[in-house]
Structures are given as structure tokens and as C-alpha cells.
């Protein structure tokens, strides 16, 4: 099993204030077979967490809000 196969099917939340980084991560993760949820800041992520229940979260640690 390759590393790409290992993440296929996971629901991933990407939290970043940069639209470029969010979209790039979305492209790569979807190519790997992941379902992707995007959030632009911590408040947006909190609103989406309970509805989406991601398996893993990738977050920028230096964002202007929360």
C-alpha cells in the first residue's frame, strides 16, 4: 500500500487564511482521494467542525482571527 492509498477516503479539514494555500491543499488532497473541507479562520472552522466531523485537521497556527 502506498502513502497515497493510506489517506484515501479520509475527510480532511484545511484551515488557513491564505486562499492560495487552501486551494492548493484541496487539489492535492482530492487527487489523493480525500474529502476536503476548507475553512478560512478559526471561527469558520469551529462552525464547520461539528457538521463535517473531519478525520484530520491541518491548520495554520498564525492567523489573524482565533
Image (cartoon, rainbow, N blue to C red):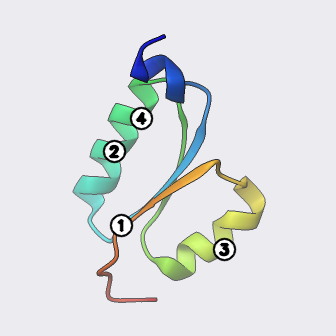
Residue extending farthest to the left is: 20
Which residue is found at the position 39% from the left and 42% from the top?
26
Marks 4/1: CA distance? 15 Å
Label 2 – label 4 distance at C-alpha: 6 Å
* Labels 4 and 1 touching (C-beta < 8 A): no
Identify the residue shown where x is 44% and y is 76%.
Answer: 41
Residue at image mark 4: 29
Between the residue at mark 3 and the residue at mark 4, the CA separation in whole angstroms equals 22 Å
Q: Which residue is mark 2?
A: 25
Q: Which mark is residue 16?
A: 1
SS at badge 3: helix
Name which of mark 3 and mark 4 comes first in the sequence. Answer: 4
Position of residue 43 relative to residue 21, above or below, is below
Coordinates of residue 40 in the picture (x, y in percent):
42, 69
Q: Residues within 10 Å of mark 4 (few under 14, many from 20)?
A: many
Q: Is residue 17 left or right of residue 47?
A: left
Judged from the image, the secondary structure of the residue bearing numbered disc 2 is helix
Viewer-side residue, 4 vs 15: 4
43 vs 7, nearest the viewer: 7
Residues tagged 2 and 4 counted as in contact (Cβ below 8 A): yes
Amino acid at each position: 500500500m502506498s502513502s497515497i492509498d493510506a489517506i484515501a477516503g479520509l475527510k480532511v479539514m484545511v484551515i488557513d487564511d491564505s486562499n492560495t494555500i487552501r486551494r492548493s491543499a484541496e487539489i492535492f488532497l482530492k487527487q489523493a482521494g480525500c474529502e476536503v473541507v476548507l475553512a478560512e479562520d478559526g471561527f469558520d472552522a469551529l462552525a464547520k467542525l461539528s457538521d463535517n466531523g473531519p478525520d484530520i485537521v491541518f491548520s495554520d497556527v498564525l492567523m489573524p482571527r482565533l
